[in-house]
Amino acid sequence: MNTGETNTAAAANKWIVAVSVMLPTLIEIIDTSVVNVSLDHIRGSLSASIDEATWTVTAYLVSNAIIIPLTGWLSRMLGRKFYLILSIVIFTVSSFLCGCAWSLQSLIFFRIIQGIGGGALQPLSQAILLEAFPLKQRGTAMALFGVGILFGPIIGPLMGGWITDNWSWQWIFYINIPIGIISVLMCMIFISDPSYMKKQQMKIDYMGLALLTLGLATLQIVLDKGQQEDWFASGFIFWLSLISVCSLLSFVVVEWFAKDPIVHLSTFKNRSFTTGSMIAFFVFFNLFGSIVLLPILLQTQLGYTATLAGQVLGLGGIATLITMPIVGVLMTKVNPKWLIAVGTVIAAYSTFRLSQFNLYVDYINVFLPRVFLGVGTGLLFVPLTTLTMSGIRREEMGNATAIYNLLRNIGASIGVAFVTTMISRHAQVHQFQLTEHLSPFDRNYQMASSAVARVFGYNGLSPDVSKFAADSLIYGNTIKQASMLAFNDTSFIIFVILLSTLPLVLLIKGGKGGATPPGVH
């Protein structure tokens, strides 16, 4: 009887722990995208240009990227429970200060602080969940974690738009406050540190810390501002890129030989961890690239409203939510590698469908690829994360989850930068090719121009005005067609990149029922 009560209490406790760590993680993930749709309101309220306003997004991403790989080290130095609560407090207080910002400069500063607080929440939550659930239920734990990771970027823009339109942009920050307070109280009561995560006396690796901070900060700025600044045609981007590459390479060398490194790169000796991290990088490259690609296509080329475009993204996210619990059950019955492979193929196929669009595609054919992407990502996320972490000892889990989350986030950032750049460059190429035919000497153009001019002429316009209107209409349609072809090209390239990761699945260790036990290498 006592044993049964103990097991019931332990089962209940792990779910309370899961809720305690996932609440702040979800709002942190939402905050990475919620500001995007409010930029115009922020710009107007704080008397800034749109380029200046985007620094509120960049500042958060930069500080977030710097903190993520430091999470394992800071957890050991401060104690994991204390560091988790401290991060939530910093995130909550800075959210309040962001809502109270009196100028753009103050908002950017508070967003940096918010990113410092929020950056640790994803890897800390993942490490705690992996430890709270027994090995056979790790698939369930990662399904829960995946809900926040994958659904947050989808619900963020929808929620941010609604709050901004119906209340004010300040409330996209204020809503974090009650959730943050509840999260702090729950973590204080229900989270406890295992013996190996208690506060430790540690030497600070100042050189590694400086190189990592400089390298990731400059990398994130390059990815966020590169296309806007025309990449390496800009001296600003060129020098930041050079600084980033040199800093990160130097960081790898310093950390590899450091006695007490802030990031234990020896984790990469684990083949499953290295391979899984590489796959995660490309999965999130595809996911975030597609999430950026689709709404731009819908609104700029197909005439969708922001609400309709949001519905397509949101309903696709629901497919992920439905898939993940099913995958958690399947992992005990099917080799997880098969789930990863099938999920990768489905996610790649969704992007291939995007590459087949034209300007007359209907809503169903727009919606289906998003559903396929949601199902594919849901299928592969849980088994991929579980197998990647399967050979990591509990003592190293914080460091491993920090590295894993960093690579995943960098994949997402590079995916977004890649998509926006490819669309812009390929649109220019196709526009040049198509406009070559807009010549009075081209037979097809002459026929089209004359036919459209006659239509305008029937409406009472003079011949000269009809001809001008016809040429303008044809030119406008040509530009739209060039943009659509650029979307097709970009989607196909993403499809090929993701499909090429399939052979990596074979390198991950683990078989039926999940993975090798922790600590087994």
Image (spheres, rainbow, N blue to C red):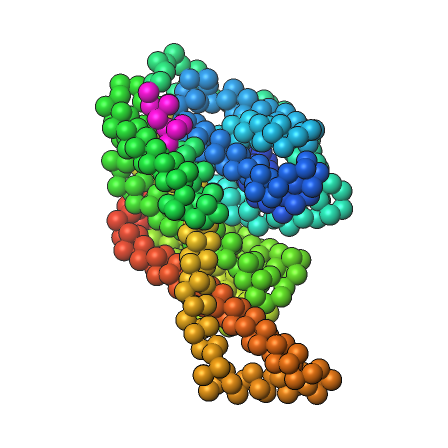
Asked whether residue 129 is in view, the answer is no
Asked if the magenta segment contains residue 285, the reply would be no
Q: Quadrant of the C terminus?
A: top left
Residue at 44% from the left image edge and 22% from the top image edge: 75
Predominant SS along the magenta part = helix
Front residue of 193 and 365: 365
When the figure is inspected, residue 64 is found, relative to residue 82, above or below; the finding is below
Total residue callouts: 0
Residue at 44% from the left image edge and 62% from the top image edge: 428
Front residue of 372 and 292: 292
Residue at 51% from the left image edge and 48% from the top image edge: 150
Relative side of 176 to 371, left or right? right
Relative side of 51 to 225, left or right? right
Q: Quadrant of the N terminus?
A: top right
Outermost residue toward the front? 464
User: x and y percent of residue 433 in the render?
Assistant: 41, 71
Asked whether residue 226 is in view, the answer is yes
Residue at 44% from the left image edge and 77% from the top image edge: 437
User: x and y percent of residue 373 in the render?
Assistant: 48, 59
User: x and y percent of residue 448 in the render?
Assistant: 54, 84
Front residue of 407 and 82: 407
Asked if the magenta segment contains residue 209, the reply would be yes
Q: Quadrant of residue 392?
A: top left
Outermost residue toward the top? 201
User: x and y percent of residue 370 in the render?
Assistant: 52, 61
Q: Quadrant of residue 112?
A: top right
Q: Quadrant of residue 186?
A: top right
When the figure is inspected, residue 306 is found, relative to residue 357, above or below; the finding is above
Relative side of 298 to 100, left or right? left
Q: Which residues are magenta?
A: 207-215
